[in-house]
Image: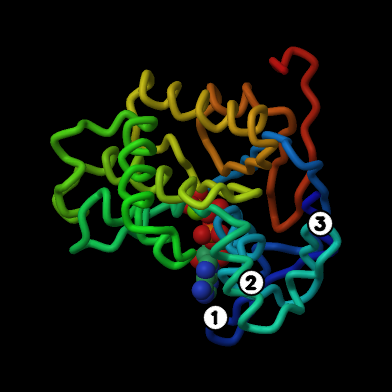
Amino acid sequence: MLEVRNVSKQFKSGDHTIKPVNDVSFSLEQGTFAAILGKSGSGKSTLLSLLGALDKATSGDVMVDGVNVSTLPDGKLTAYRRNDIGFVFQQYNLVPNLTAKENVMLPMEFARVRRSERQARAAELLEQVELEADVHDRKANRLSGGQQQRVSIARALANNPKIILADEPTGNLDEQTGELIIELLRSLTRTQNTTVLVVTHDMALARKTDRRFRLAKGSLAEEFDRSRAR
Ligand SMILES: Nc1ncnc2c1ncn2[C@@H]1O[C@H](COP(=O)(O)OP(=O)(O)OP(=O)(O)O)[C@@H](O)[C@H]1O
Ligand SMILES: [Mg+2]
C-alpha cells in the first residue's frame, strides 16, 4: 500500500515561492494501475519525484507498507530507491556511455545480482520492451528517443520493484509500441501485484488504468468515469 499524506513541495524562485504540490493525499492498494494527468507545469514530475524519494517533500509523509519513507535515514532511503521503486524518468536519464544492456544491468549490479544472471535478465527485459536486438550493445547516447525510453522502462523493471513510477512512459513511442508498454505495465500489476503509477497525457494509457487523478494548481483530485475500461 502506498499512502501519501498531506504532501507539499514548494520552490523558492527569486522573491516568490511556488507550490506545485500542495497538500496532496491519496492511497493506492498494492497492485493498482493508476494515472496522474495534468497540464504541463502542473507539478506531476515533482510529485513523482517525492514518491520515489528522489526529492524531499517540504511537508507531509509518504508511507509504503506502513513505513514512513519521508523520515528514513540515508542508507535505508537508498535501499528504498534501489529495491522498492522502479523509476522511469521523463528524460530517461540513462548513463550515456553505457550500452542499452549495461544500463539495464546497473540496478542489478547495485543489488549484487550475479553477472551471468544480470546479463540474462537484461536481455530478457530488453526483449520484453521490444528493443531491436541489434541495438542492445549500442551506447545509450546513440539511441533514438523511443529506444532510450524503452531501455529506461526495462531498467525500471530490473529489480522487480513493488512500485513503478513512470513519467510519460509512452511519450516518445509510436502507437503500437506504446500499446505494448501499456500491456506490459498492466500485466505486472496482475502477475507480480506491482503498483504502477504513471504520469501521462496519453488517453489510450489513461483509459486502461484502474484509477485516474488530475493535478491542478497543486491539488490532486480523483476522476471518476463510468465508461472507463477496467
Ligand atoms: N527544482 C526546481 N526549482 C524550482 N522550480 C521547480 C523545480 N522543479 C520544478 N519546478 C517548477 O515546478 C512546476 C512544476 O514542474 P513539473 O516538472 O513538476 O511539472 P510537470 O507537470 O511535470 O510538467 P510537464 O508535463 O511539462 O512535464 C513548474 O513551474 C517548474 O518550473
Ligand atoms: Mg513532467
Q: Is mark 1 within 8 Å of ligand 1?
A: yes
Q: Is mark 2 within 8 Å of ligand 1?
A: yes
Q: CA distance from mark 1 to mark 2?
A: 7 Å
User: Measuring 18% from the left and 63% from the top, which residue is drawn there?
Assistant: 97
Q: Nearer the viewer, residue 216 or 183?
A: 183
Checking the image for residue 132, the label placed there is none
Label 1 belongs to which residue?
Answer: 13
- Where in the figure is residue 96, as x and y percent of width and height? 22, 62
Mark 3: few, some, or many residues within 10 Å (few <14, many ≥20)?
few
Identify residue type, mark 1. Answer: Ser
User: Measuring 27% from the left and 56% from the top, which residue is drawn there?
Assistant: 102
Identify residue type, mark 2. Answer: Ile
Residue 48 in view in this figure: yes
Farthest residue in the bottom direction? 15
- Answer yes or no: do the residues labelled 3 and 2 have beta carbons within 8 Å? no
Q: Classify residue 228 by image quadrant.
A: top right
Give the mark, 1 or 2, whose residue is nearer the N terminus. 1
Q: Nearer the viewer, residue 228 or 217?
A: 228
Mark 2: few, some, or many residues within 10 Å (few <14, many ≥20)?
few
Q: Nearer the viewer, residue 142 or 159?
A: 159
Residue 41 in view in this figure: no
Give the mark, 3 or 2, whose residue is nearer the N terminus. 2
Instruction: Tell me: residue 179, above or below residue 108.
Output: above
Q: Quadrant of the C terminus?
A: top right
Mark 1: few, some, or many residues within 10 Å (few <14, many ≥20)?
few
Label 3 belongs to which residue?
Answer: 65
Label 2 belongs to which residue?
Answer: 18
